[in-house]
Amino acid sequence: MVDNVKRSTGYRSYGQFCALARALDVVGERWNLLIVRELLPGPLRYTELKSSLAGVATNLLAERLRTLEANGIVERRLQDSGVAYALTAWGAQLREPMEALGRWGAPLLATGRGDDAFRPRWLTLALPALLHGVTATPAVELGIETDGLLMVLRVDSDGPSVSVPAGGRPQSVLTAAPDVVVGLAAGGLTIDEALTRAKLEGDGRVLRAVFPAAARDRPI
């Protein structure tokens, strides 16, 4: 796997015999980890990547994809809709360190969104990261609808995971702005506070199960 890592055009190495340094040689360039973030939920076409990564120049995105592909992190797949980019099995292993980095950076969101771009798809990485260590038996599922996208947050004995359903709607659905969802997951908002700014359909006990830090001692 790692024996196939190549030095592509423009490759800059730290020149250190250290796993962290060599990892940064491969994914440390600007936009690389954000491309991985986009592909963690599933493959995307080039135009979809470009649309989601506002601010990246077309030629730079193409260069970064070539580098990630040459290093065995990204691969091209032929789908009915055409060619799509997807993570390899090795590339998908970046989920764990990226979730850890996201947890570390969560306090930086306290200043609010401002004029920053946001895509609901990004919550598929952020929510499992913020809810790390939360489990539930039996499993519980909460639909979360934000900025027009419905996703399903599932918490079971293995922990939290998020998916975008192909069809159907969970029995319990929270419709809220992204900052409310992040506030609940990070424990910065109580459920009572969140529900003054959000709408809940279904069983409120599901909220307490998936957002225990927000439940505190204030039952619904």
Image: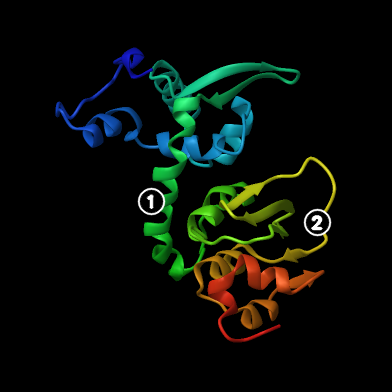
Nearest the eye: 214 or 43 = 214
Residue drawn 15% across the image and 28% down it: 17
Q: Position of residue 205 (x, y in %)?
A: 72, 73
Query: Mark number for residue 149?
Result: none
User: In 3D space, how far apart are the residues under numbered discs 1 and 2 (Cα atoms)?
Assistant: 30 Å
Quadrant of res 33: top left
Query: Which residue ends up furthest to the left in the rendered image?
Result: 16
Give the residue type at disc 2.
Pro
Quadrant of res 163: top right
Residue drawn 66% across the image and 54% down it: 154
Query: Mark number for residue 101?
Result: 1
Query: Which residue ends up furthest to the bottom in the rendered image?
Result: 218
Quick one: quadrant of the C terminus? bottom right
Q: Which residue is mark 2?
A: 170
Q: Compare marks 1 and 2 and give the one earlier in the sequence.
A: 1
Residue drawn 70% across the image and 51% down it: 151
Give the residue type at disc 1.
Leu
Element under disc 2: loop
